Image: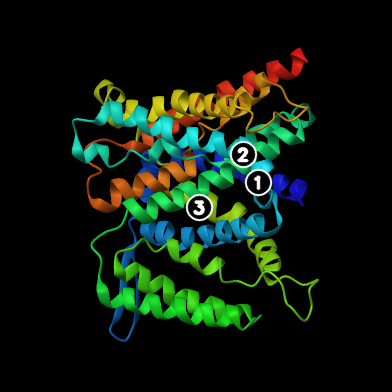
Amino acid sequence: MINEFLKKESASGILLMIATALAMIAANTPFAAQWYNQLIDLPVMFQVGDLIINKPLLLWINDGLMAVFFFLVGLELKREILEGELSEPQKIILPAAGAVGGMLVPALFYVYFTWDNPVALAGWAIPAATDIAFALGILALLGSRVPVSLKVFLVTLAIIDDIGAIAIIALFYTENISQGPLIVAAVCLAILTFLNLRNVQSVPSYILLGAVLWVAMLKSGVHATLAGVMLAFFIPMRDPDQPEKSALKDLEHNLHPSVSLVILPVFAFANAGIDLFSISIESLYHPVTLGIILGLFVGKQLGVFVFAKLAVMLGWAKLPEDINWKQLYGCAILCGVGFTMSLFIGSLAFEETGNNQIADERLGILMGSLASAVFGYFWLRKTAVDQ
């Protein structure tokens, strides 16, 4: 199963690179730039009676399609906790230590640069994220020279990183709370709990309630993508009458191609289009840009590697036999590829709050992620040759 997962994530990473390149070309080609901007700003309205959802296409992608992405993340988390890598405490200590360091240290780097600007400080979580698909796409370019245990370390670290990102979004990136929709969301959760306790195996029933939950969350001020994670944890893992069947695993298997090969590339294309002609020296040296670049490229590798090293030195974890510290450091560098999750958190911190005029956080995300990708690739290539 892990090999199948790695293949899908690697393919997604390659598509993300292509989508990013296309977005950059579209945003910087005179005849295409206007079309690109009109496309992502296209108003899209959904109405049922008095219920109206009116958003530009970009926010439908970020709030709607990404809810499906987070739903898949939730399914993967539940499976890993019940039956996968996260079900064995001894196996998760090393990547968990790396994940904690990889979230804490980059955030501190960012805070250092933006401490005196309360608006800019809102983006502190941007460099704390890791893009598993992009990172595995880079590892795929190295082929069999990279041990499978190193890929498993990266996958497990990214899963724990996702848990941290979900918690950060839930706690720090919510708008003013609206009580009425929140009550509707609570009712949906109560019904989902009832269905799960009754071992109802009908996936469409869960999905229908999940759609209502998503609308309620959207209207409540709590970020709508969290509805995807919540819904995932109610999907039954096993059918007591047919233990060999798993609604969760089937749903995860069916969703993975569309999320990895369609939703994430569409998200990248819609969010990565930076106008390079508008970049100035001042924008490169802006505290937001510097904080993100150094957080991703320096903070990530330091946090992941140092915290993992400490876990081994303290006797809490052991380094897998088929990888060495040089390779682990190379993997730590690749963790600085924040991209998808960094862009998403950046949109919550700045675009959706109307504070995106202070700096274009996407510039720092792309530069920090690119530096981590290139340096990490060549470092791992060199360490593979040295063995």
Quadrant location, the C terminus: top right
Q: Quadrant of residue 295?
A: top left
Tell whether label 3 touches label 2 (CB within 8 Å).
Answer: no
Q: Spatial distance from mark 2 to mark 1, Cα to Cα?
A: 7 Å
**Residue 93 horizontal/vertical position (percent):** 62, 39
The label on residue 266 is 3
What's under tag 2, amino acid-wise? Ile
- Camera sees residue 208: no
- Give the residue number, with chain letter if any, for mark 2: 93
- Camera sees residue 350: yes
Mark toward the viewer: 2 or 3 = 2
- Residue 186 vs 348, above or below: the answer is below
Mark 2 secondary-structure assignment: helix
Q: Residue furthest toward the top?
A: 386
Q: Quadrant of residue 55?
A: bottom left
For image coordinates 30% across by 31% down, the residue present is: 111
Left or right for 52, reference 202: left
Q: Total marks drawn?
A: 3
For disc 3, the neighbor class at 10 Å (few under 14, some 14 to 19, many from 20) is many
Tell whether label 1 touches label 2 (CB within 8 Å).
Answer: yes
Left or right for 53, reference 91: left
Q: Earlier in the sequence, mark 3 or mark 1?
A: 1
- Give the residue number, with chain letter if any, for mark 1: 89
For image coordinates 38% across by 52% down, the residue present is: 169
- Residue 57 vs 334, above or below: the answer is below
Looking at the image, which is closer to me, 28 or 17? 17
- Residue 258 vs 19, above or below: the answer is below
Looking at the image, which is closer to me, 337 or 187? 187
Mark 3 secondary-structure assignment: helix
What's under tag 3, amino acid-wise? Val
The label on residue 271 is none
For disc 1, the neighbor class at 10 Å (few under 14, some 14 to 19, many from 20) is few
